[in-house]
Image: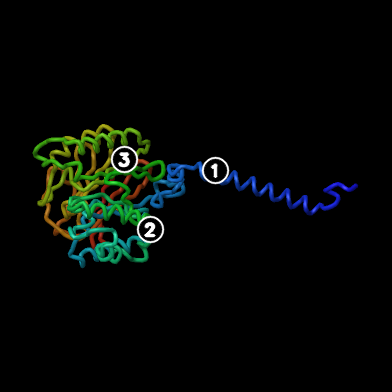
Amino acid sequence: MQSLRERNPRVIACVFLICVLFGFSRITMKQTNNQSPEVRTQDVVDPTQPQTPVRHKDLFFFIIGDWGTGPLEKAREVAAALATMAAQRRPTAVISTGDNIYDPTVKNATDVQFLTHFEQIYGAESLAGVPWLLSLGNHDHETPQILQAQLDYGKAHPHRWSLPAPYYRRRYGEQVEFFVLDSYELMLNPPESGAIDEMSKAQLQWLDGALQSSTAPWKLIIAHRPVYSGGHAHGNSLWLQQNLVPLMKKWKVQAHFCGDDHSLQVLRADGIAYFVSGAGAKRSKSDTLPETVFRGRGKPNGFMTVRWNSEVTMTVDVISSEGALLHSEIVNI
């Protein structure tokens, strides 16, 4: 009598293949069903982060602030200078020092202002795909809807608009880490009161821990409100000098970038470099302070660039809307 294998070997092979496939599908389904949303979230790659090891010499940033308002022709002039420079050397990212939206009527992430004041203004081919890292200014907090619209716009356009939270940190390679602050929440009380409320305290505690845990030799702060400034509109902040600067000294922060005053300034105090880049659209006057190294005379519009000459030397260039180099400042560790 013939065995089953001898009578029909094809049937045996088919049965074996079906069993193998059934078992594999059950294993796959079990793994998928057991995977939590948190694990999947951890597997998602942040599109604004470099995906390969970054050398300090490869990093190149634009710093621009207070660009979310008119006059639009001035914003276009600065944007044209950004595009020209980007065509010569593509930036790693554009960093905004805040006041990204001024119009209090903005309600959501589909508002036309994202098109007219951002996408169309900075739509040059050389800037296409360059991520923006954004901080929040006082106008970005003018209504809860403006803030939420920007957070939602970032979720819809993560490759272009990086604003994961009101304050956050962003690292590039082993050398450089930015700590992006929310100046409005940090200073809810009038500066002259000297008070620190719970929201201010929480952000300062976060910054203290973030700076402590950072292993990057270059620690740079991005914010909106100036610590030192000769600007007529806002000027120095004694509150920040008393509450933020001690943390910067404690963890050896090399530089603080901000906007708010619509001018271009470079200042130095207690071994820290302070850069005011708030001339992305509007312009305002500034005076010379004891801390002043450079201020743009004649109220020029413009922006700044940041690059590294070596592991211990950073250069910040001040660029006018005509593309002229106004000043170069070297910062060392």
Find residue 219 and name its label. Answer: 3
Q: Which residue is mark 2?
A: 90
Residue 108, image x, y percentages: 26, 58
Residue 329, image x, y percentages: 26, 48
- What is the count of numbered marks? 3
* Rendered position, 79 above or below 194: below
Crowd around label 2: few <14 · some 14–19 · many ≥20 (10 Å):
some
N-term-proximal mark, 2 vs 3: 2
Marks 3 and 1 sit apart, C-alpha to C-alpha, by 41 Å
Crowd around label 3: few <14 · some 14–19 · many ≥20 (10 Å):
many
N-term-proximal mark, 2 vs 1: 1
Residue 37, image x, y percentages: 44, 44
Q: Residue at x 12, y 47 (%)?
A: 235
| Residue, far front | 1
Q: Residue at x 21, y 38 (%)?
A: 199
User: Which is in the foreground here, disc 3 or disc 1?
Assistant: 1
N-term-proximal mark, 3 vs 1: 1
Q: In the structure shown, which secondary structural element does the residue marked by tag 3 occupy?
A: strand
Q: Nearer the viewer, residue 286 or 143?
A: 143
Q: Residue at x 88, y 48 (%)?
A: 2
Q: In the structure shown, which secondary structural element does the residue marked by tag 2 occupy?
A: loop
Quarter location, residue 178 = top left
Quarter location, residue 212 = top left
Q: Nearer the viewer, residue 331 or 3?
A: 3
Marks 2 and 3 sit apart, C-alpha to C-alpha, by 22 Å
Q: In the structure shown, which secondary structural element does the residue marked by tag 1 occupy?
A: helix
Q: Residue at x 20, y 43 (%)?
A: 185
Q: Which residue is mark 1?
A: 31
Asked if marks 2 and 1 touch (Cβ < 8 Å), the reply is: no
Identity of the amino acid at label 2?
Arg
